[in-house]
Amino acid sequence: MTDWTDGYITEIDYTHGYYQELNPLRIRLLFLNLGLAFPETASVCELGFGQGLSANIHAAAQANGQLWATDFNPSQVSFAQSLAAASGANAQLFDQSFSDFCRRDDLPDFDYIGLHGIWSWISDESRAVIVDFIRRKLKVGGVLYLSYNALPGWAAFAPIRHLMTEYSEIMGVKGQGVLNGLDAALAFTDKLLATNPLYARANPQVNERVKKLAEQNRNYLAHEYFNRNWEPMHFATIANWLMPAKLNYACSAHYLDHVSAMNLTADQQAFLQEIPDVLFRETARDFMVNQQFRRDYWIKGARRINSIEQIEGLRNMRVILMLHRADVSLKAAGALGECTMDIGVYHPVLDVLADHTPKTLAQIELAVKDKGVSFAQVVQAILVLTGTVKLQQYRMNP
Ligand SMILES: C[S@@+](CC[C@H](N)C(=O)[O-])C[C@H]1O[C@@H](n2cnc3c(N)ncnc32)[C@H](O)[C@@H]1O
């Protein structure tokens, strides 16, 4: 019998999560803010959609678009297809492996290809299949969203993952199931750390991080730690992998990364500004924030727009407030810790949005002008609010 799992955990399902970074419509604000042209995202592809919550929500939000996606776990695909049937969205959801799906000859060319939580957990062979697919099927001007476990953030903790999978392999009881195996490996790790090994003394944050593991969703943990393949990478390694697909690095897909003051000290910002090479600057920045998980947009042929197009595009962007005005928290966390937003800027902006009707940034600009809030501050406020809104929803509905 051929093993279709390729060493990936399929015995237990992945969590039912929604990942906003996968949303093709989200690239607009970021790209406009950076002065970059962005594609209309009419044809979208997601590789490894898990339970398909994100894929279905995005397909439903693209009235005239089409979404093609695959995940080789049939239980998850069954759930995802039931959502698509209920919504009637144009979502073509398959249970094919990456290599089978990427070889199909009936796929359109894509404006946008997204992979969330895939890259670090698959084999080099699958990565090569995916890069070749992007090279062939991503349109010129199209965008790739890619997330992955990054270095240096995983450097200290990677040996714990090694220890747990080795324990499972060598000491684990055959037939006990992935979740029991996970519990046993965690218990063994606890005992080992309780002996105060030199490793833990050299990496004092490890004890705390192992404790936090016990509090996390066990299905998530099994998928994060117990696959055959698990490889955190440096940003430059990813850039090398993507080179054959002719991709340029565009920006982080995590909105709050775009607010330097939340993530970098003044010294760090000045240090990074001295680095002319965009890619090497990212490498250095990853040390500043001890980057553990990167979420990035890459583009096939980056093109700058002029400042008139940029301002026009931003002014025409429409946003809507999804939470009750009173439920919006004015706190946000970056690499430097939690910070509180300036009420002089955020209160007037939120007041304009409080009726939950869509507003262009131009309308907001006009409405808050008398309060001394500039257009640049409106753009920044919308970026930060968009970047934190999902976290805020989670806080309300844990
Ligand atoms: C960590 S989950 C992420 C799921 C989803 N992107 C999310 O973020 O919720 C990885 C997914 O990739 C799928 N997968 C792993 N290897 C695959 C392969 N070779 N072909 C197709 N799907 C694969 C798994 O079934 C799993 O659902």
Image: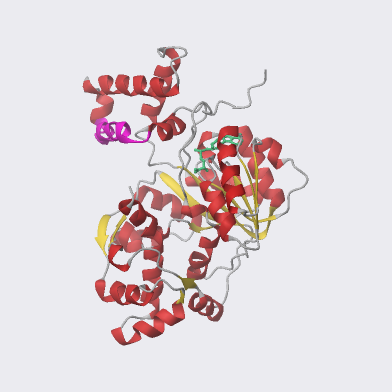
* Residue at position x 68%, y 45% in the image: 133
State the scheme by which the image is colored: secondary structure
Quadrant in the rendering for residue 261: bottom left
Locate residue 18, reporting x and y percent.
46, 49
- Position of 59 compared to 361: left or right? right
Residue 94, quarter of the rendered image: top right
Please state which of residues 353 and 30 is positioned toward the viewer in this rendering. 353
From the top left corner, tell me how far across and down residue 88 is, in percent: 62, 53
* Residue at 53% across, 54% down: 57
- Residue 73 seen in render: no
Quadrant, the N terminus: top right
- Give the quarter the ligand 1 occupies: top right
Residue ranking furthest to the front: 86
> Could you tell me how many numbered marks the image carries?
0
In the image, residue 203 lies in the stretch drawn in magenta: yes
Figure check: 23 above or below 147: below
Which residue appears farthest toward the right when viewing the image? 105
Pinpoint residue 169: horizontal percent, then vertical percent. 45, 16
Check residue 390 for magenta coloring: no
Q: Is residue 344 visible in the rendered structure shown here?
A: yes
Q: Position of residue 267 (x, y in %)?
A: 29, 60
As drawn, 154 above or below 2: below
For the magenta stretch, what is the residue range?
Answer: 202-217
Vertical arrangement, residue 172 with respect to residue 373, above or below? above
Q: Nearer the viewer, residue 47 or 298?
A: 47
> Is most of the magenta stretch helix, strand or loop?
helix
